[in-house]
Amino acid sequence: MSEMYAYCGLNCATCQAYIATQANNREAQEKLLAQWRVEYQSPEMDLQTVTCDGCTTTLRLGGYCSQCAVRACGVAHGVVNCAHCAEFEGCEKLEQFYQVAPEVRTTLTNLRAALG
C-alpha cells in the first residue's frame, strides 16, 4: 500500500474512509459510518464524514480534517506535511495532537530526518 501523509503524520492511504472513498465503495462507507457513529459516540455523523480524498487535498475532507488545527496550520504554512515546517520542533499544535495519536511523532520525526 502506498503512503500519503496528512499534515499531522497520519497515513491517509491506510484510512478506511479514504480507501472506501477512492474505491467508490458506498457499502464500505456505510459500514464504516455505522462503526464510527458508535465508536465516536456521534449518531449525527453523515456519509460526508466517511467521504475523503485525503487531508492534503482541497477536495472532499472526511471526519475531523476540515476542522483540524494541525491541517489548517500546514495549509497556512504551505508545507507538504508538518515534517517540512520550519516551526516543527516544539510545535504546540503537534504536541497536543501527539496526545491523541502518539505514533505520529515517530512518523513525522522520520520524515523530517529523511529530508536531510
Image (spheres, rainbow, N blue to C red):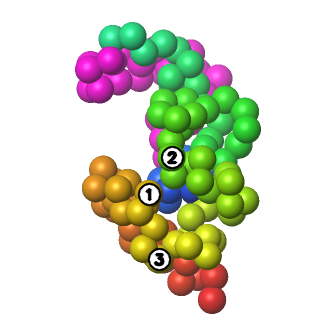
* Residue 58 placement (x, y as % from top left): 73, 38
Q: Distance between the residues labelled 2 and 3?
A: 17 Å
Task: Please state which of residues 17 and 92 is positioned toward the viewer in this rendering.
Answer: 92
Residue located farthest toward the bottom when viewing the structure as drawn: 116
Report x, y in % for residue 104: 40, 62
Q: Where is residue 13 in the image (x, y as percent from the top left)?
A: 56, 47
Residue at 70% across / 43% down in the picture? 57
Please name whichever residue, 78 or 63, is drawn nearer the observer in this view of the structure: 78
Q: Quadrant of residue 94?
A: bottom left
Residue type at numbered disc 1: Lys
Q: Which of marks 2 and 3 is nearer the N terminus?
A: 2
Q: Which residue corresponds to the image point at 55% horizontal and 78% vertical from the top-left?
A: 112
Q: Compared to 64, does 90 lie above or below?
A: below
Majority SS type along the magenta span: helix
Q: Which amino acid does label 2 sit on?
A: Ala
Q: Earlier in the sequence, mark 1 or mark 2?
A: 2
Mark 1, Cα crowd under 10 Å, few <14 / some 14-19 / many 20+, is some
- 95 left or right, relative to 78: left
| Residue 101 badge | none
Which stretch is magenta?
A: 13-42
Residues at circles 1 and 2 in contact by the CB criterion of under 8 Å: yes
Tags 2 and 3 touching, CB below 8 Å = no
Q: Is residue 4 rendered magenta in the image?
A: no
Q: Can residue 107 be seen in this view?
A: no
Q: How many marks?
A: 3
Q: How far apart are marks 1 and 2 (CA)?
A: 7 Å
Residue where numbered disc 2 is placed: 69
Q: Which residue corresponds to mark 3?
A: 89
**Mark sitting on residue 93:** 1
Quadrant holding the C terminus: bottom right
